[in-house]
Image (cartoon, rainbow, N blue to C red):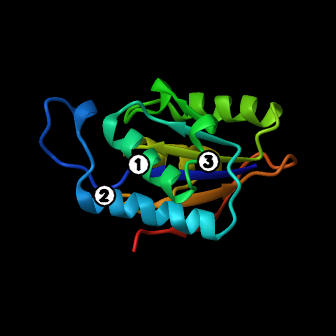
């Protein structure tokens, strides 16, 4: 299974609540560029898990635009991937998705959870999760632990 873990794009710091923080214009551009990169690498996503927080939803919108709106039916908004979600629970859900035939997955979430997910899957987190950073983790059926295959920082 290929798993792409992505932090949302740059977000505004002031909003009525943390969950209502929107992306900045730069954040929208970062998210779109990462979506373009994924699409240019011919990554065919089977599923996209997205935090319900506004900045993550807006990040998905930009990635979806880069995919010519082909990801809408593959998107699942999940409360389990908000900033302080449980990486062990995420790992368990990824196992269920793998058993259901999902081969390529994008997760759009937040600090600190994005780092916790990579650490849970790989035993370490080799990436600095700047806004819109993407980490590719490959897990093979015979593996008990994944390996980071690439890190793509926003341009």
Q: Which residue shows up at 16% across the image and 46% down it?
A: 13
Can the viewer see residue 115 in this picture? yes
> Quick one: label 1 or label 3, which is nearer the N terminus?
1
Task: State which quarter of the image contains the C terminus.
Answer: bottom left
> Quick one: label 2 or label 3, which is nearer the N terminus?
2
- The residue that label 1 is drawn on is 59
Q: Where is residue 142 in the image (x, y as percent from the top left)?
A: 87, 48
Q: Are marks 2 and 3 in contact (CB under 8 Å)?
A: no
What distance separates the C-alpha of mark 2 from that of mark 1?
8 Å
Neighbor class of circle 2 (other Cα within 10 Å; few <14, some 14-19, many 20+) is many
- The residue that label 2 is drawn on is 27
Q: Nearer the viewer, residue 91 or 17?
A: 17
Q: Where is residue 138 in the image (x, y as percent from the top left)?
A: 71, 56
SS at badge 3: loop
Q: Are marks 2 and 1 in contact (CB under 8 Å)?
A: yes
What distance separates the C-alpha of mark 1 from that of mark 3?
15 Å
Q: Position of residue 6 (x, y in %)?
A: 48, 52
- The residue that label 3 is drawn on is 70
Looking at this rendering, what residue extends furthest in the front direction?
A: 68
Numbered mark located on residue 6 in the image? none
Q: Which residue shows up at 43% across the image and 60% down it?
A: 32
SS at badge 1: helix
Neighbor class of circle 1 (other Cα within 10 Å; few <14, some 14-19, many 20+) is many
Q: Nearer the viewer, residue 126 or 85?
A: 85
């Amino acid at each position: 299974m290929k798993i792409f873990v992505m932090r949302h794009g740059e977000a505004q710091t002031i909003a009525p609540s943390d969950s209502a923080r929107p992306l900045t214009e730069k954040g929208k551009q970062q998210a779109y560029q990462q979506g373009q990169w994924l699409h240019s690498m011919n990554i065919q996503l089977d599923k996209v898990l997205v935090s319900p927080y506004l900045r993550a939803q807006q990040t998905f919108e930009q990635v979806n635009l880069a995919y010519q709106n082909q990801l809408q039916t593959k998107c699942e908004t999940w409360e389990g991937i908000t900033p302080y979600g449980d990486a062990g629970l995420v790992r368990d859900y990824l196992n269920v998705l793998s058993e259901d035939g999902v081969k390529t997955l994008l997760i759009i979430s937040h600090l600190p959870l994005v780092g916790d997910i990579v650490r849970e899957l790989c035993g370490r987190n080799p990436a600095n999760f700047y806004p819109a950073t993407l980490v590719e983790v490959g897990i093979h059926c015979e593996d008990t632990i994944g390996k980071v295959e690439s890190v793509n920082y926003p341009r």
